[in-house]
Image: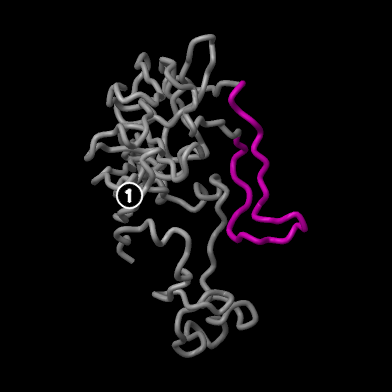
Amino acid sequence: MGLKKFKPTTPSRRWMSGSDFKEITKHEPERSLIVALKQSGGRNNYGRITVRHQAGGHKRFLRLIDFKRDLFDQQGKIIAIEYDPNRSARIALVEYPNNIKRYILAPVGMKVGDEIISSSQKETEIKAGNCLLLKYIPSGTLIHNLELAKGKGGQIVRGAGTSAQIMAKEGGFAHVKLPSGEVRLISLECRATIGQMGNIDHEAISIGKAGRKRWMGIKPTVRGLAMNPVDHPHGGGEGKSGQGNPHPVSKWGQPTKGYRTRKPNRYSNKFIVKRRKP
């Protein structure tokens, strides 16, 4: 899980870096666990762009990840660590008894040959890759793939290098510190997987050139100042002046720096013990 640098054969290559993929042991996905991924280009069913800056990119297959980990009390064996183009983290191919195969998210230290288990028993070993109820995970343990609702499957803490930490337990809830710094109440009946997410070096990757973003299906973002008045509130004017010095707003006139858009008294407010820093 390291980085590789490139020889500066072009200006864009001088600062470019990427993953060395040394941890990858299998280069073709498991055919029974992939489906075709249809790309929308940011367009809705009328063909109108509803999400800007999306188009093109390399063709991908969607890997079916087991976020629920619902094969309980069955010992699984890691048979491969694979690359997933749809996420920053690596995935692991697990083989269970009766030749059942599943993809799971690969935490730090997971390697081929390791055995993992998902269980509701208190006696389950606290080991990276094992999935338990929060009430059976000791305080201070690093976790990932965390459920927000019982039985729904892991929804948060799934990106490369991320981890949450159980701070305390009381009143049927665990106080969980999330990667953002937010401390949140989560039911002790929810499940989480032990360990920190793998591919820690992902955040240090330097894209290097615009074309590499296009391979990812991301189009350029044009500054409002460079547009015409009809296209953006910041547009128009002579040279780089724009329309005087307006308050920064979005294309639709909503303030973009420090303006709070979150409505009060939302459902989740009562579960937030400490908010993240703005």
Question: At 38% from the left edge and 36% from the top edge, which residue is drawn?
Answer: 192
Q: Dominant secondary structure of the magenta stretch?
A: loop
Q: Is residue 223 magenta?
A: no
Res. 204 visible in picture: no
Percent coordinates x, y for residue 248 in the rendering: 46, 79
SS class of the residue under badge 1? Answer: loop
The residue sitting at the bottom extreme is 244
Question: At 40% from the left edge and 51% from the top edge, which residue is drawn?
Answer: 11
In this image, 148 relative to 56: left or right? left
* Residue 90, picture quadrant: top left
Pick the front one: 29 or 263: 263
* Image: 20 above or below 247: above
Residue position marked by numbered label 1 in the rendering: 178
Question: At 43% from the left edge and 45% from the top edge, which residue is drawn?
Answer: 156
In this image, 83 relative to 132: left or right? right
Percent coordinates x, y for residue 173 in the rendering: 33, 46
* Residue 258, picture quadrant: bottom left
What residue range appears in magenta?
A: 32-60
Q: Is residue 50 magenta?
A: yes
* Image: 172 above or below 257: above
Pick the front one: 126 or 198: 126
In this image, 211 relative to 24: left or right? right
Percent coordinates x, y for residue 28 in the rendering: 54, 22
Tell me the kind of residue under disc 1: Leu
In this image, 188 relative to 255: left or right? left
The residue sitting at the right extreme is 46
The residue sitting at the front extreme is 171
Res. 206 visible in picture: yes
Numbered label tally: 1
Percent coordinates x, y for residue 226 in the rendering: 54, 75
Q: How many residues crowd mark 1 within 10 Å: few (<14), some (14–19), many (20+)?
A: many
Tell me the quadrant of the picture where the C terminus can be found.
bottom left
